[in-house]
Image (cartoon, helix red, strand yellow):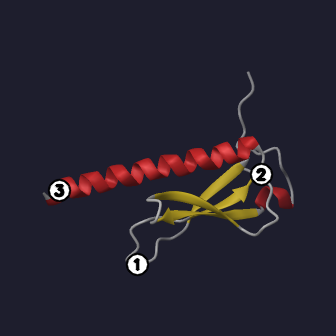
Amino acid sequence: MSVKKPLVRFENKVRKKGHVTSIWDVYGGGPDSPFDGLERRGFLGNILWWPGWRRYVFEPDGPCVLFDAKCLREIADFCEGQTLKHREAQKRLKGRQA
């Protein structure tokens, strides 16, 4: 059975003072990615909280960034997972304040 190798890598940026949500840089290729050279380290964009939609979103870096279905799934799964974590943390905070 082959091990699925990630096509993208997420790096949490340092949170700015006063910010409640996180921002991640998204790079092409994970630590064991089939990519090598510049493709492996290529910056693809950011994942950040979008208040209007009340969820984490992916903001690509520029108009010429290409993604396949697997890459998009990895990004979407990461966004959904972080949105759920954020919502759970907010529920716990509200529960403590009540």
Per the model, the C-alpha gap separating discs 1 and 3 is 22 Å
Camera-side mark, 3 or 2: 2
Picture disc at residue 96: 3
**Residue at the far front in the pictured view:** 52
In x, y percent, where is residue 34?
A: 82, 44
Is the residue 28 above or below the residue 17 in the image?
above
Amino acid bearing label 2: Phe
Neighbour tally class for label 1: few under 14, some 14-19, many 20 plus, Cα within 10 Å: few
**Residue at the far bottom in the pictured view:** 17
Which residue is denoted by mark 1 in the rendering?
Answer: 17
Instruction: Report the side of 81 relative to 73 (left or right).
Output: left
Instruction: Report the side of 14 relative to 66 (left or right).
Output: left
Disc 2, SS: loop
The mark that comes first in sequence, 2 or 1, is: 1
Amino acid bearing label 3: Arg
The mark that comes first in sequence, 3 or 2, is: 2
Amino acid bearing label 1: Lys
Neighbour tally class for label 3: few under 14, some 14-19, many 20 plus, Cα within 10 Å: few
Q: Quadrant of the N terminus?
A: top right
Residue sitting at x 22%, y 57%: 94
Neighbour tally class for label 2: few under 14, some 14-19, many 20 plus, Cα within 10 Å: few
Q: Count of labels shown?
A: 3
Instruction: Report the side of 82 relative to 78 (left or right).
Output: left
